[in-house]
Image: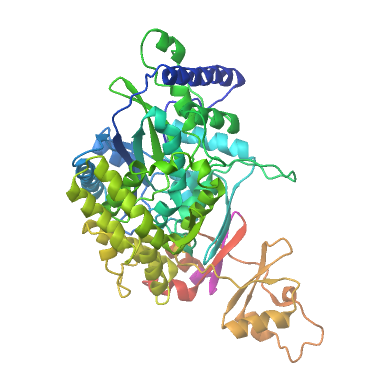
Amino acid sequence: MGEQKVNRSLTEERKAVFIKHLLDDVKALEIMLENDQIEKGITRIGAEQEFCLITKDWRPATNNQEILAAINDPHFTTELARYNLEINLDPFELKDDCFSKVENQLRSLLNKATDVSEKHNSKVVLTGILPTISKTHLSLDYITPNPRYYALNDMLMGLRRSNFQLHLQGVDELSIAHDSVLFEACNTSFQLHLQIDPEDFISSFNWSQAIAGPVLSICCNSPLLMGRELWNETRVALFRQSIDTRHISEALKDQEPRVAFGSNWATGTAASIYKENISKYKIILSRELDENSLDILEKGEIPKLKALNLHSGTIYPWNRACYGVGNGKPHLRIENRYIPSGPSLIDELANFAFWVGIMRGRPKHFDDMAKIMDFREAKSNFVKAARNGRDAVMCWEGKKYSAKKLIRKVFLPIAYDGLRKEGVAEEDIKRLLNVIETRLKGNTGASWMISNYRDLIKVVKKDKALRIITKYTYLNQIKGIPIHEWEDADKTDALSESSFWVGHIMSTALFTVKRTDLASLATSIMEWNNIHHVPVEDDEGKLCGLLTWTHANKYSKETDEKGYMVQDIMEENVITAESTTTIKEAINIMKEKEIGCLPVLQNDELIGIVTAYDVKPYDRD
């Protein structure tokens, strides 16, 4: 999440000072580019590994700060939510056994995180979206208590001027509103970095945009969100909407979201990309800076461009231009942000090698992408990949290909050539790209999760299915094998009954009726669907009553001459629960009140229902 020392209160005076630093940073970057001060002639790779912390019950944990303190390693840092952490890997020069070095360091750091987590009754899992995240885990109670995260939440909510809205359509549909930026915390990525020579930066950046769709199509690993089967890489849609600050109005105007693929090919220099971002996106965070970047340049020193990097860190393009200073030398790199975490360490390394190989193997006739490809075609390929994964159909050089054929015929050969050109060890090239080749025929992370989830929900409740998926993701990961070798989840897994909230076991597939509906309609719905409890809503969709078999039995359709309405036979005094009501408490309420169900409310809105049948497995009395 970038710079941690930020001003939470963005006054006009502070904002003006920060903007002055921001503009001077752009000038400083232009001067360094003009004076050939940016490092070139060497290519380095780097990565950031985000991961989830889960409890022994396979649900999100809340102890990232305790685990971070116990790890005590500067490679680790917090993320937005209490159930996430991030590892920042060291950069390695792109040559010889560099991918083995990345792999060894990442494995060592993940092992360290695993050992410490186990001591804190937690586990580490790599996944694009943790299947067991629920709406409850997105409350502000789960935000990591860090000034930057609170500031980011406050500023984005202020720009939005309303709750964040999610509208995602896949096999299932998810439509939900939320009052914080925590939707973003569902996303867990494996972010890739590649250093680029300044004179080749624009050609490389445009190439990274052009190849994004094909690369993503074989890396998808995030098909589930809150028990809904959505896109193959749901992160793409979720991240875009999770921090979308655009205010909906009646005006028809083009506004760029802070998470975007882009709107056109880049031109000019790397500084031009930063200028465009400053032009399009409001400043939402600032910090106090002691020195001006132009003054630092005047002294013959290298500025870190802190204002520019802070503003850039509040914009989330899927391919991002980055400036950094290493060993006193400034450099430029491209950050790939669309690759999900998981499904295994070896899969991640294969994705990394595949992307880097394609980037470095760019055929010369793609140096000017604007002459070869319409930008909207590249953008369309990316969206189709996120939706459909390797089953997507894409356009490339005027022809249509299946994603699998495009990767096999076009991009794998480029990746092999690119890695060999850089002198990467042949053993690593074959080992890692073979994972990509085999994945074309076997499972991707998304296809494994979808097929197992569909099988599981036929035999167990949704919450249990999601916990089993998470458990077997973890078990397969610790074997250290790629996704195409993973075993399916065990549908007969007893899985200890650890559900403790009503929200874990309630039914969300609800039949409801209006208070002004005919009673005969309501009782018919109950008979047709063999249900014993039907919540009643008023004209505004608020819960106002409950219809049960007891009420229905007192009503006779045959003797209904008055045309009774639901409100004439329903129970008006409804006892309810919340999603965080414990199951034990729900059992006690139903026994004490001698009732068979509890409608579940959140912010006065009906979100589910839990019945005596649902709680029976948990009733030990």
Asked if residue 348 lies left or right of residue 288, the reply is left
Judging depth in this view, the residue of 52 and 337 nearest the camera is 337
* Residue 131 in sight: no
Q: How many marks overall?
A: 0
Give the magenta range.
590-603
Query: Residue drawn 41% across and 16% down?
Result: 35
Is residue 301 on the magenta stretch? no
Confirm whether the magenta stretch covers residue 597: yes
Query: Residue 553, position in %: x, y?
Result: 65, 86
Give the camera-side residue of 47 and 330. 330
* Quadrant including the C terminus: bottom left
Q: Is residue 141 left or right of residue 553?
A: left
Q: Position of residue 306 (x, y in %)?
A: 43, 23
In the image as oriented, which residue stretches furthest toward the front?
A: 365
Q: Nearer the viewer, residue 37 or 443?
A: 37
- Which residue is outermost to the right? 562
Colour mode?
Answer: rainbow
Q: Quadrant of residue 65?
A: top left
In this rendering, the answer to whether 120 lies above or below 308 is below
